[in-house]
Structures are given as structure tokens and as C-alpha cells.
Amino acid sequence: MSMNITPADYAPWFAGFLAAAQTGTWQDKPPALKQLAIMPEAWLKDVAPGRVRYIWPNTGDHDINPGRAFGGWVGALSDHVVSICMASALSADEGFTTQDLQIKMFRPIAHGDIEITAEVINRSRATGYVEAEWRRSDGKLLVKVLAWKAIRDRASLGAR
């Protein structure tokens, strides 16, 4: 990932995630990312407070049928993207958990580069609402993601 990040724009715990993604040197990559083969170090292209952009190079590693990505994988990657987006909009003492995740698939997820963008649409003291879209290289909408995040004190979530 090659981008300029100003760590002061983000909570220290999130700035640490971004630094690891930027360099590709994880001291402790989250187990779910390892097991699901989610690679923010390669796929996260842009981040700003309340916005992220990923490019997922779909090579077929997550196909359920030839040329069609498994819906469970779409769900897992979608939750990761909207979660990173939410994290980019939190203060140092805030954390979150997913309350609701809705995924609407409009077309099969074929091979090739898939652009996934997410944005925090609304943020209150206790809730964040994030939307994401998956688009293929010709701009056609593949997936729409709607996510509600419960914002809590990090300590109450057992955060490290």
C-alpha cells in the first residue's frame, strides 16, 4: 500500500493497523485476516477519515463455481472493509462492533480487479452507519453493503 498517512488523523490503535498495512510487517496480524486471506497490505489503496478504497484482485481463489465468488467470502471481505472505514472515524478511546450487516449482490463477482469503496454516512455518539459498493472495472455495480456499527468505549469491548 503506498499512500501518505498522517497518524495524528487517527486513533493510535488504528494508526498502528495502518502502519502495519503500509509496510506489510505485522507484529500480530489479526487471526481472522490471516485465516480468511484478507490482505489489507496489498488491497487497501486509500484511507481518509470516514472513507476507504480497496482494490481486490479476484483471481478465483474464493470461487464457489467457476467465475463466481462465494457469497460468504463477499460477506467477510465486506465486513472487513466497512469495519476499517468505521475505525478511520473513531477517537482513541472509541471502539465498535458490528450490529447489522446487509449485503445486496446485483451481479456475479467475476474475476478481475474489483474496486470496493466505503464511506461513513452517519455517525452519532453510539452508532455509525457505513455504506460500501463493489464495482468491476467497467463501473458496473456488483454489491451494495449497508452496515450499522455500535460505537462503545474501547475498554468495554475488551480492546487491547
Image: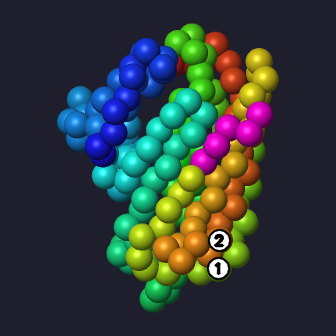
User: How many C-alpha atoms fall within 10 Å of the one at disc 1: few (<14), some, or many (≥20)?
Assistant: few
Q: How is the image coloured?
A: rainbow
Q: Quadrant location of the C terminus? A: top left
Report the front residue among 148 and 15. 15
Residue at x 68%, y 56% (from the top left corner) = 145
First to last magenta residue range? 118-122
Q: Quadrant of residue 121?
A: top right
| Secondary structure beneath label 1 | loop
- The image quarter containing residue 140 is bottom right
Element at label 2: strand
The reply to whether callout 1 and callout 2 are in contact (CB within 8 Å) is: yes
Q: Earlier in the sequence, mark 1 or mark 2?
A: 1
Residue on which disc 2 sits: 141
Q: Is residue 121 magenta?
A: yes
* 101 within the magenta span: no
Do we see residue 85 in this rendering?
A: yes
Residue occupied by mark 1: 107
